Amino acid sequence: STSGQTNGTCVPVQQCRDVFDTLRSPLLSVDSANKIRQNVCELRGVRRSVCCAQDQVERIAIHRNAILLPLDCGVSKQWEPKSIAAKANIYEFPWIALIRSSKATEDHDLYCTGSLINNRYVLTTARCLKAKERKEL
């Protein structure tokens, strides 16, 4: 049973909606951490599992690195497709990152773009990182 004394199921932490959301919050209170610790259970082959209330269980296939990614995505906006030559306004596409050299002085020193996949990672193409430039990005 869960710390709230309800019937529960031992599942990977990513499949327990309320626990996973709590763990992903920027500030984890001592009380919340203690409640999660009380719900820890052992599930064979799973590193982190908790006893989860039935109404909070999400049956989904989870990759082992899923905890690194956010559950929400970029803000969706209605927009008219632009030509390749058109310039986007700043903040028009908040999930796009512009990558340039730390030594760049001109606009032509811009290298490439990437997509923000969370607050720590930018996904870009391999051509963006040439060996001699890598240390300067």
Image (cartoon, rainbow, N blue to C red):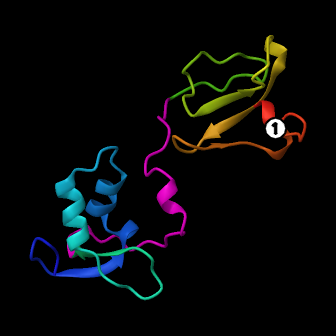
Q: Up-down: is 84 above or below 63?
A: above
Toward the viewer: 104 or 77? 104
8 to the left or right of 101: left
Looking at the picture, does residue 11 appear above or below residue 33? below
Q: Is residue 120 above or below residue 51?
A: above
| Coordinates of residue 114 in the picture (x, y in percent) | 69, 37
- Quarter of the figure with the C terminus: top right
Three-letter amino acid code at the position of disc 1: Arg
| Secondary element at image label 1 | helix
- Give, as a single range, the part of the protein colored magenta: 54-77
Residue at the top extreme of this rendering: 106
Asked if residue 48 lies in the magenta stretch, the reply is no
Front one among 120 and 132? 132
Instruction: Tell me where residue 112 sits by quadrant.
Output: top right
For this view, does 83 lie left or right of residue 88?
right
Residue 65 lies within the magenta run:
yes
Q: Residue at x 21, y 57 (%)?
A: 32
The quadrant in which the N terminus is found is bottom left
* Res 65 → quadrant: bottom right
- Judge left or right: residue 100 versus residue 62: right
Give the residue furthest to the bottom.
Answer: 44
Q: How many marks?
A: 1
Report the residue at 90% width, 36% height from top.
132
- The x, y position of residue 56, in whole percent, is 25, 68
Bin the neighbour count of mark 1 within 10 Å (Cα to Cα): few under 14, some 14-19, many 20 and up: few
Residue under pointer 1: 134
Instruction: Farthest residue to the left: give it.
Output: 5
Question: Residue 24: x and y, percent?
Answer: 36, 52
Please, is residue 37 above or below residue 90 in the view? below
At 70% from the left and 16% from the top, the residue drawn is 87
Q: Residue at x 73, y 17 (%)?
A: 86
Which SS does the magenta portion mostly show?
loop
